[in-house]
Amino acid sequence: MAEIRVKVSDEEHDIIKQNADTLGMKISPYIRQVAQNPNIIHFDYSAIERHTRQVGNIEKSINMLVYTIHLNNEYLPKEIEGIAEYIEDIWKTERQLLRTVRKQWERSIKNDR
């Protein structure tokens, strides 16, 4: 097996380690992967996780509303408004998610140059 040694600054090492950790990889396999495929894009998944939680909250709210309507045989305008607010929150998160992905994509392209 051939060996390649590369010296990096402490700051560069921290960045490489952070990127590898983000992908759940050790540094050596990460560097091999990046060297063989430099078009790897790193994403911050926290926006996606928030979005997923909000979708789950909406699902729970809709299920509770449907159950209550069937149980009481009545229309509940306040609960409908609450769901509309959840939907607006989802759209806000969706827009934030798309902005985040776009920024990371642009940063990745800029770093490739």
Image (spheres, grey):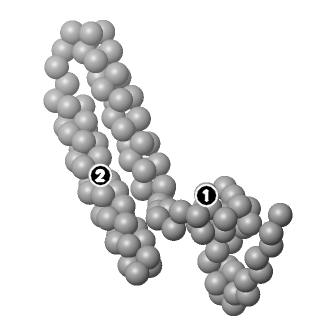
Q: Residue furthest front?
A: 2
Assess disc 1: are there few (<14), some (14-19) or many (≥20) residues with their C-alpha within 10 Å of its C-alpha: few
Instruction: Please name whichever residue, 5 or 55, is drawn nearer the observer in this view of the structure.
Output: 5
The percent position of residue 6, horizontal first and vertical second, equals 73, 83
* 37 lies above or below 74: below
Q: Is residue 10 above or below residue 78?
A: below
Residue 77 at what x, y percent from top left? 16, 29
Q: Amino acid at mark 1?
A: Leu
Position of residue 110 measured from the top left corner of the image (x, y, whole percent) = 38, 78
What residue is disc 2 on?
Answer: 94
Report which quarter residue 92 is drawn in: bottom left
Quarter location, residue 62: top left
Alpha-carbon distance for marks 1 and 2?
Answer: 23 Å
Callout 1 touching callout 2 (CB < 8 Å): no
Instruction: Identify whether 8 is placed above or below 66.
Output: below
Q: Quadrant of the N terminus?
A: bottom right
Residue closer to the observer: 25 or 35: 35
Q: Quadrant of residue 75?
A: top left
Any part of residue 42 in sight: no
Q: Count the numbered circles shown.
A: 2
Outermost residue to the right = 1
Q: Is residue 45 left or right of residue 51?
A: right
Foreground label between 1 and 2:
1
Amino acid bearing label 2:
Glu
Residue 9 place in picture, x, y as percent: 69, 90
N-terminal label among 1 and 2: 1
Name the residue that disc number 1 marks.
23
Residue 51 placement, left or right of 32:
left
Q: Residue at x 71, y 61 (%)?
A: 29
Q: Secondary structure at mark 2?
A: helix
Work out whether residue 105 can be spotted.
yes
The one nearer the camera, 32 or 90, is 32
